[in-house]
Amino acid sequence: MHNRKISVVGLGYVGLPVAVSLSRHGQVVAFDINENRINELKKGEDHTGEVASEKLKSADLLITKDSADLKKADFHIVTVPTPITNAKRPDLSPVYAASRTVGKQLKHGDIVVYESTVYPGVTEDECVPILEKESGLKYPEDFKVGYSPERINPGDKKNRLETIVKIVAGTDEETCNIVAEVYGSIIEAGIHKAPSIQVAETAKVIENTQRDINIALMNELALICNRLDIDTLSVLEAASTKWNFLNFKPGLVGGHCIGVDPYYLTHKAELAGHNPQVILSGRRINDGMGEFVAHETIKHLFKKGIGSKASITIIGFTFKEDCPDIRNTRVIDIVKELESFGMSVQVVDSMADADEAEKEYGIKIVKAENLAPADAVIFAVQHKEYVEKGWSLVTSLLKNKKGFVADIKGCLDMTQKPDDVELWRL
């Protein structure tokens, strides 16, 4: 059992579950700069759905936006987001800001562990100097750092923080062992000690880059099959009968991990003088899938003689199923492309925060009961409640229960397709 006093900086999808789990062994200083988030958590509410209200209320947390409270801890875990800019370059401003905040409260003997996704070298080469400057302490004599990449999968009720192997690394062997001991107190699946912080940083970005490339291959297959008038999902069903076939499917690739992490790796690669052709090629394919779906929908509607006066309902707006997170959702690409042709688009998503969607994307989420009948429906996100309703939901959204349906993830049973519906699948 560790004897460290813990703080967690950043209480989002990653930080909150970490803080709650670690609070089983003593009070955790749970810090965030977002006052609304602090107030929400103090009420025992978590809009992300990652921590149940009862569990949150019973956790031994000092929920605070006062950075001075960080002095009460000697083991600081930084879990702030690391997005990309509009130019698809790493945006490390949140992790820099968190480093300044922690640095101001840093004491001799403290350890700072980063969970935020970064490219190799950020922890030691970029964050440590900030910690030194703000604290007046010297690294590694006065304080140590570690890196333990987050592996939280939002909306996944099976693969949770405790059931996923945790990678840890530290300034030196002693620090790595302490980091392993702290996380080992809550991780049931085991701890993997990486030989260096840079190895751990690289492991994080390659995990999601690998998935991104595999999905890109499936998306390119979908582009090819579409030209050949072959059903992609039927091809994958047949191919998956081979024992070593990797079961990836085509689709939109958004969110704050798979759609972002590859750019951290490619940025570092370019700084090192290497042109990462495969990774960037996969990114281009995946980033273009929303526009492709929109164009196929437009093409089918024009063939029906409806054209730019068409009305379209999109089911789902979050970046993935059964998750309220709308960060980097690629559904917005479909919306914008359809609207650029003058088409009327309405979006329904019971899990997405309507105010956040309007603020971030200018999108009005329409309640199901207020949807107008549409000429076409795009099934974009397979939330469980929508999948269970299946064709009854889709046809209820169409004018006279007939029209065009684009099923991006293959959620609908083809054998039950109504005769008056034209179905297209990615």
Image (spheres, helix red, strand yellow):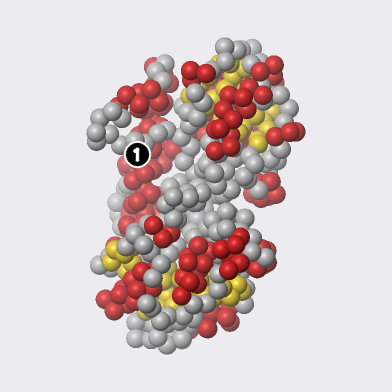
Question: Residue 343 location in percent, x, y?
Answer: 67, 26
Q: Is residue 395 left or right of residue 29?
A: right
The quadrant where residue 367 appears: top right
Q: Is residue 223 left or right of residue 386?
A: left
| Residue at the limit of the structure toward the right, as seen here | 370
**Up/down of 410 relative to 100, above or below:** above
Secondary structure under tag 1 reads helix
Which residue type does callout 1 highlight? Asn
Q: Is residue 122 left or right of residue 104?
A: left
Task: Give the residue at mark 1.
Answer: 214
**Neighbour tally class for label 1: few under 14, some 14-19, many 20 plus, Cα within 10 Å:** some
**Up/down of 424 relative to 303, above or below:** below
The quadrant where residue 44 appears: bottom right
Question: Residue 155 location in percent, x, y?
Answer: 51, 49
Viewer-proximal residue among 317 and 259: 317
Viewer-proximal residue among 48 and 81: 48
Q: Quadrant of the N terminus?
A: bottom left
The residue drawn where x is 48% and y is 18% is 415
The residue drawn where x is 62% and y is 27% is 393
Question: Residue 326 location in percent, x, y?
Answer: 58, 47
Q: Is residue 186 visible?
A: yes
**Up/down of 364 relative to 309, above or below:** below
